[in-house]
Image: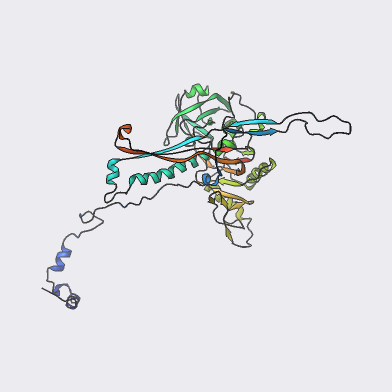
Amino acid sequence: MSVSLAEYIAQANRGATQSVLGSEYLSKAFSGTPFTVDTDTNIFTTTFGRKVWHALNNQTRFFNALPRNVWGNVAGWRVRSDRGSERSNPITETGSLPTVDISAIQTVSSLPRIVGTTFAASVKAMFTSQLEGGVGDVLALENENAQLDHIKEMNLELLASSTAGITTATSTSSIIATNANNFRVGDQVGFSDAGTLENTTGAQITAKSATTRALTFDAAVDAVLESSPATADGIFTYSRAGMTSIDDIVSIDGTNFLDGNVATFANAYDLTTTLAASGRTIADNPWKTAASVDGNSGTGRDLSLNMLDTAIQKIRTNGGEPKLIVMGHDQYFKLERLLNSQQRYLGQEEYTVGVGSEKTFPGTRTGLILATYMGIPILPDADTTKSPVIGSTGGTHGSNVYVLDTDYLEVAVAQPTQYIENRDYFAASSLVVRGLLYTMAELRAHRFDVQAKILDLNE
């Protein structure tokens, strides 16, 4: 039966039982189970779109802020650490010339480190990913993700802690450490046992677990330590398999660590050759001592403006000029609250400061939302390392604070990031396409005494 639109509307408005469509029309629609989307009635099949959202922090702020330069044709550099003794003096009319002496020249050897990131996809995955509900070009997707992960790894290595507290010994060649994720397979570490430095050659990490924080070494832990590891004992960097971290550089011969308040002599480049059980006094190598390493023997305390002022003052005393302050977001907001009481509301003009290819958060010239402190840009980075807590349960304090003169820091790039793809199924012994990203670079510090850090801070 043909019904006009006007008649349909008129009939429908009179009620369901008077519809010209018949008495059974509406009753059939509402008497049974309706087709739905939220419950399974086979009317709708869930499919996945091609957009992939990241649930990870992919920021690499510190890496972006550092100067990046071509490596050049050098394998190191020299540091003039002494003016010479009595070589400059007043001369009386007939007096003798000053004593002839020469400058003390120190050599630093630095070689590039290789950071690699791999990914792969099977030929079946590459085909089905193009079908309805697939992610699209899975190889291109993983390539994009690997690029983010590759730069993130370099940022993590640049901000890795040079020390970790030992929580327990799980076997004769394995320990659980507080900051274990700051170390990589291939790193070599020294040990601090109850305030005594031990292991004169460095124990190499052969395996690590990100979940349990366990580190396995190429030699028995007891043999390395010469005694059983205990809470408040610790490990420190002897050499890195990956890129040298800013914590390695700032901590050279200068970090007071956990028990006994003794220096750990974290190493960077080839500056430390052997470690005696009695350690080595900082006075023996003053040119390697950081401008300021402000620790509290593993006990937490709150950040103060005096700590920042001391770090800046010591850098300037040594002839440097701080260009960048790096900290975690926890210390960033603590510093904002410290400055909050000192505000003078002369205006609310917002501004940012460029640091490398990064910018600070918007700030006001009254200091309400921080952009600078004493004119030095502040860059919060979520990857900023934390210092270990003394105690049987391990754990870490809040993030460290670094005050840096970036005129003497650079990421020297020997080979920019390269992409290599391999479709040799026989070589892989599998029907997969493999991809590799690698970068050859190293963080170089031309001066150590114009860098500083503040550690053992509460979150």
x then y, percent, for residue 259: 57, 31
Viewed as shown, does residue 161 lie left or right of 24? right
Q: Residue at x 29, y 43 (%)?
A: 125
The N terminus lies in which quarter of the figure?
A: bottom left
Above or below, comparing residue 372 to residue 410 in the picture: below
- Colour scheme shown: rainbow
Q: Is residue 241 above or below residue 20?
A: above
Which quarter of the picture shows residue 97?
Answer: top right
**Closer to the camera, 410 or 58?**
410
Examine the image and state in which quarter residue 102 appears.
top right
Q: Position of residue 365 (x, y in %)?
A: 61, 58
Asked whether residue 29 is in view, the answer is yes
Residue at horizontal 39%, vertical 44%?
Answer: 143
Q: Position of residue 363 (x, y in %)?
A: 57, 56
Question: Which residue occupies the foreground of this view, 337 or 134?
Answer: 134
Query: What x and y, as percent, mark residue 204?
Result: 48, 27
